[in-house]
Amino acid sequence: LPGNTNTNYGIRQIDNGLQNFGQAVAPTAPAAEATGPGAGTILLWLYLSGAIIFLVLSLREVILILRTAIYGQYTTIGSYRIFSSSRTHAPFSFMGWVFISDPALYDEKGLEYIFRHEEAHNRCWHWLDMILMQLFFVVFWFHPLVWIAWRRLILEAERACDDAVIGQDDGREYASLLISIAQ
């Protein structure tokens, strides 16, 4: 300022003006608003939802099998306890029990093949393999290799039991039984 001998006064005014301008342009930030769950939280909930769904489905299957074994009708043929269920399904075994939708649907030779096949499953404890794989499946349900391993385990168990049934036979009768079961 002309005629002003105090030059510090003008600098102080500019400095005060800049401080006031900075406060006006950048006011204090308001409290952060909740923007919703993050990606990690969403992925965790998605994973847990899938694991719970597969656990419930697995438990449902085991409960249906045990309920059939406890409350269902059974007949004893040889050393086998055969449980009949009202559902239509392929024969299977679990913990040494054999489940057939209706034994009357099969002739004597067909029942013999079924019993030998299921006995091979029981000797190899394939039911325990299936339970362990099912638990593994509940934990890693999202991974495609687990789905592939699950399918391969089933196929290999069935192939091994089929080989045990055929043994020295040519396998044509057994193959026709398998086709009739599949139909």
Image (cartoon, rainbow, N blue to C red):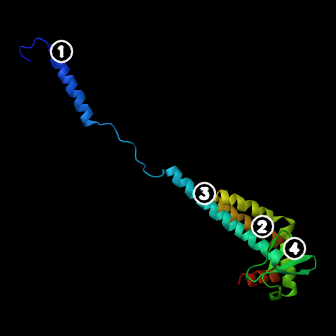
Say whether residue 169 is visible: no
Q: CA distance from mark 2 to mark 3?
A: 30 Å
Name which of mark 1 and mark 4 comes first in the sequence.
1
Mark 4 surroundings: few (<14), some (14-19) or many (≥20) residues within 10 A: few
Mark number displayed over residue 157: 2
What secondary structure is marked by label 4? Answer: loop
What secondary structure is marked by label 3? Answer: helix
Say whether residue 33 is visible: yes
Type of residue at label 1?
Asn
- The image position of residue 92, as x and y in percent, is 79, 75
- Do the numbered discs 1 and 4 sit on residues whose CB atoms are within 8 Å? no
Q: Quadrant of residue 22?
A: top left
Type of residue at label 2?
Ala
Mark number displayed over residue 167: 4
Point out the frontmost of discs 2 and 4. Answer: 2
Point out the frontmost of discs 1 and 4. Answer: 1
